[in-house]
Image: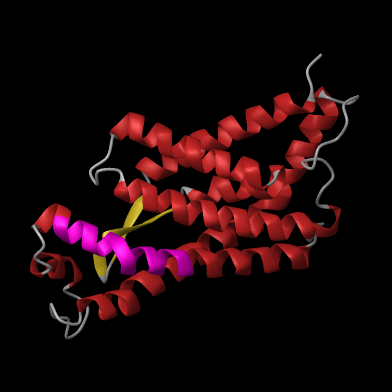
């Protein structure tokens, strides 16, 4: 007999597919650093983390990264993908663990705030300590001057101050905007998705022991 685990696998597979599609298609450049993309691939992973728990959310991050590499490969010697996995994993883990303990509307807000802070913090550290240096060395042979062409809208930027201004004008605000959009959308759609999961579970697995995906959001109604 099919068990609730089957439903969980189906949900993970579908969220992974959506996450991968978002990862490779829907992207918008940040105006102050056009090599940075606003993209929403973490949205399905966060929803999966909220609905199925932290491990499932991390699995979605890992699978979508593997699928992305298979479909379009890498242009960053896997460093960009590695940084994305670190940022996404930390974000999904923190927010879903908080929500696992506080399954209410207030808990969802708190989990989202914790997730946003984690997202921005890890992204800034990654950019400051290795991402920017990697791109300068990988693409421009160690000369930061060409990179400034992608940050021409940042006022008074030079090869001496570009890292500080990049963090202020690009890394911090872009990740605040992106994480805010992702968690805002999650907050708006998650209740409907959780109810849909509950309905499917009741229809196809009525005799199975309910997992955390079932009846988890009565307090969000």
Quarter of the image where one finds residue 128: bottom left
User: Which colour assignment does the render follow?
Assistant: secondary structure
Quarter of the image where one finds residue 219: bottom right
Q: Position of residue 174 (x, y in %)?
A: 39, 68
Frontmost residue, 81 versus 218:
81
Q: Position of residue 209 (x, y in %)?
A: 88, 31
Q: Residue furthest right?
A: 207
Q: Position of residue 134 (x, y in %)?
A: 23, 57
- Vertical comparison of 55 with 153: above or below: above
Q: Which residues are magenta?
A: 121-137
In this rendering, position of residue 26 left or right of residue 188: left
Quarter of the image where one finds residue 136: bottom left
Instruction: Mark yes or no: residue 177 visible.
Output: no
Magenta residue check for 125 = yes
Frontmost residue, 214 versus 88:
88
| Quadrant into which the N terminus falls | top right
Seen at 73% across and 51% down, the residue is 191
| Quadrant into which the C terminus falls | bottom right
Q: Position of residue 22 (x, y in %)?
A: 43, 43
In this rendering, position of residue 169 left or right of residue 154: right
Seen at 49% across and 53% down, the residue is 88
- Vertical comparison of 135 with 26: above or below: below
Seen at 30% across and 62% down, the residue is 130
Instruction: Mark yes or no: residue 125 visible.
Output: yes
């Amino acid at each position: 007999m099919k068990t609730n685990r089957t439903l969980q696998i189906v949900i993970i597979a579908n969220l992974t597919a959506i996450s991968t599609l978002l990862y490779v298609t829907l992207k918008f450049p940040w105006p102050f650093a056009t090599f940075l993309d606003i993209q929403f691939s973490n949205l399905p992973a966060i929803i999966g983390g909220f609905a199925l728990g932290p491990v499932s959310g991390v699995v979605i991050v890992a699978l979508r990264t593997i699928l992305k590499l298979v479909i379009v490969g890498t242009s960053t010697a896997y460093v960009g993908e590695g940084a994305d996995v670190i940022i996404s994993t930390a974000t999904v883990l923190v927010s879903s663990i908080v929500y696992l303990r506080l399954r209410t509307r207030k808990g969802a807000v708190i989990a989202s705030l914790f997730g946003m802070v984690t997202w921005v913090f890890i992204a800034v550290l990654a950019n400051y300590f290795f991402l920017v240096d990697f791109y300068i060395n990988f693409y421009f042979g160690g000369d930061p001057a060409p990179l400034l062409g992608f940050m021409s809208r940042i006022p008074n930027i030079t090869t001496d101050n570009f890292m500080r201004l990049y963090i202020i004008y690009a890394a911090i605000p872009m990740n605040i905007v992106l994480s805010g959009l992702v968690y805002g959308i999650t907050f708006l759609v998650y209740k409907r998705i959780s109810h849909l999961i509950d309905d499917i579970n009741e229809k196809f697995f009525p005799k199975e022991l309910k997992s955390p995906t079932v009846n988890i959001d009565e307090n969000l109604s």
